[in-house]
Amino acid sequence: MSLKAFARRNALHYNCSARSEAFVEDQITVRLPAPLGRTLRRTSRRLGLRPSAVVRMALEAFVHGAPPTAGKRAERVEHLIGSLASEVPDLAERHREYVLAALKHGG
C-alpha cells in the first residue's frame, strides 16, 4: 500500500464552516492525521465546543494572533537577553568552567 493510500485511508475527514450568525460564509474540507483528529476531539470535549468551533479558534489564532517568525533566532529572543539573574558575576566569560564543575559534582 502506498503512503498516499495509507494516509487517505487513515485520515480523519472534517468539514469546517466559517459562520457569521446563522449564515455560512465559506466552507472547507480539512484532512487530519488520526492523532491530530483524536487531539481535536479531546480538546473539543474538554472545552465543551464542537470540533468546528475549535478549528475556527485555532485558525483565527494562527492567522491573526501569531507574530511572524522572520529573522534570526537570536533576534526573536533578543528581549530575553539579560532577563535572568544567575548571581555568578563572570558566568558569560567562564561558563564552560562552571558547567564542567557542575557536571563533576552531579549538579
Image (cartoon, helix red, strand yellow):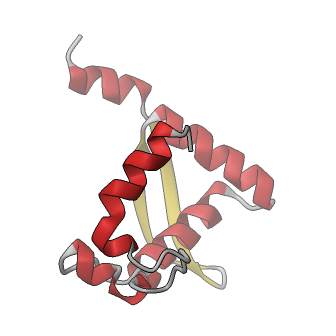
Instruction: Examine the rendered structure and indicate whether residue 23 appears above or below residue 10.
Output: below
Which residue appears at 55% of the width and 77% of the height?
A: 87
- x, y percent for residue 28: 40, 61
Instruction: Examine the rendered structure and indicate whether residue 82 appears above or below residue 5.
Output: below
Q: Is residue 25 visible?
A: no
Instruction: Examine the rendered structure and indicate whether residue 3 appears above or below residue 88.
Output: above
Q: How many marks?
A: 0
Where is the N terminus found, in terms of image quarters? top left
Left or right: where 49 falls relative to 15: right
Which residue appears at 23% of the width and 27% of the height?
A: 4
Which residue appears at 29% of the width and 72% of the height?
A: 93
Q: Quadrant of residue 21?
A: bottom right
- x, y percent for residue 13: 46, 41
Which residue appears at 38% of the width and 23% of the height?
A: 9
Q: Quadrant of residue 37?
A: top right
Where is the C terminus found, in terms of image quarters? top right
Q: Nearer the viewer, residue 45 or 92?
A: 92
Q: Nearer the viewer, residue 1 or 81?
A: 81
Q: Nearer the viewer, residue 66 or 103?
A: 103
- x, y percent for residue 12: 48, 37
- Residue at the limit of the structure toward the top, as seen here: 1
- x, y percent for residue 76: 31, 80
Instruction: Examine the rendered structure and indicate whether residue 80 appears above or below residue 29.
Output: below
Left or right: where 70 falls relative to 98: left
Q: Quadrant of residue 10?
A: top left
Q: Is residue 32 visible?
A: yes
Left or right: where 72 falls relative to 95: left
Q: Nearer the viewer, residue 27 or 86?
A: 86
